[in-house]
Image (cartoon, rainbow, N blue to C red):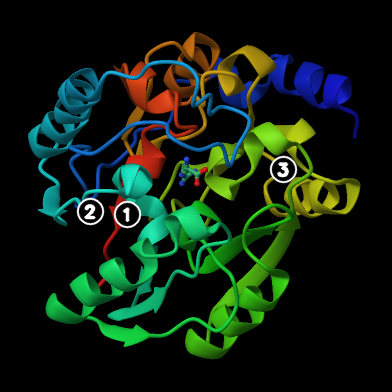
Amino acid sequence: MTDTARRSASQEPTAAKSAAPQERVATQRTVLMCRPEHFTVSYRINPWMHPEDPTDTSLAVRQWEELYKIYLDLGFEVELIAPIPGLPDMVYAANGGFTLDGIAYGAKFQYPERGPEGPAYMEWFAANGFEVREPVSVNEGEGDFLLVGDRILAGTGFRSDAASHDELRRIYGDREVVTLTLIDPSFYHLDTAIAVLDPVPVNGHSNIAFLPKAFDAHSLDILDELYPDAVVVNDDDAAVLGLNSFSDGKNVVIASRAVGFEASLRERGYTPIGVDLSELLLGGGGVKCCTLELRR
Ligand code: ARG
């Protein structure tokens, strides 16, 4: 399907849409975050980063605190890892690894600037009840690996190596791992191009939202087949990293500027909660990037 066909299809009135939106159920989430005490943009490893422009660390901290408070108000359990000086991207905790069934698959970063974050997060996992698996292949954790129901969607193309998808398969034996290829440098991690809407399946299915132009043709076919009812977001929402969001099944924390996505979520019965992380967007990250899910 082309982008246009996909979009108009999603806008056609359907029987489901004229009925009352589905009742959504919030689920308990446990996440790991890292206060951006050392945040700045001192190097450029994605198109959002402009080291020549100033950043405001205290504003980043205030905006991050806002997200932290939203999670606490939603009843999430929020654990914290101590920020390390000299690792300005450590705030993007999603990249610190991938956890499932009490096993933490460590991250191995593509760029040396972020390299030391891998061991730092692995140390935290080991000290906090996880069995840690040292990574062999380059992978950037939950930035590229998204658990959708029982299935793991795994991104490649910019950061995580496709070989890491095989490692995932070996580590989490009974899970289906689906490889998706990213093609737009602005959407370099899978969590910038796909949002998981239902962490727990609803009537046997977990839905997603995604940005079609971020994927190659083969990946689009897979997404269309697996998620025929997916929410498709527009370029404006994607341009503020609107998809980089975090859902508990009912409440979806999103970039406050992603107004189209906000409307689609309401239509489907979700409760969007907007937050402004403009300063962290300067590093190329948003809500989800600041959030690593812990599944013990
Ligand atoms: N500056 C960071 C990088 O390029 C941003 C990471 C964003 N994280 C994410 N989960 N998408 O690696």
Q: Is residue 171 left or right of residue 186?
A: left
Q: Reading the chain from its start, which is encountered first: label 3 or label 1? A: 3
User: Is the residue marked by circle 3 packed among few (<14), some (14-19), or many (20+) residues within 10 Å?
Assistant: few
Q: Residue at x 77, y 20 (%)?
A: 7
Q: Report the disc number at residue 292.
A: 1
The amino acid type, in three-letter code, at marker 3 is Pro
Query: Is the CB of the residue bearing disc 3 within 8 angstroms of ligand 1?
Result: no
Q: Is residue 269 visible?
A: no
Q: Is residue 127 left or right of residue 251?
A: left
Q: Reading the chain from its start, which is encountered first: label 3 or label 2? A: 2
Spatial separation of the CA atoms under disc 3 and disc 2: 29 Å
Location of residue 225 in the rendering, given as x and y in whole percent from the top left corner: 78, 52
Q: Residue at x 45, y 69 (%)?
A: 107
Location of residue 35 in the rendering, given as x and y in whole percent from the top left corner: 18, 41
* Callout 1 secondary element: strand
Disc 1 + disc 2, Cβ < 8 Å: yes
Instruction: From the image, tell me which residue sits under label 3.
Output: 228
Q: Is residue 182 visible?
A: yes
* Callout 3 secondary element: loop
The amino acid type, in three-letter code, at marker 1 is Leu
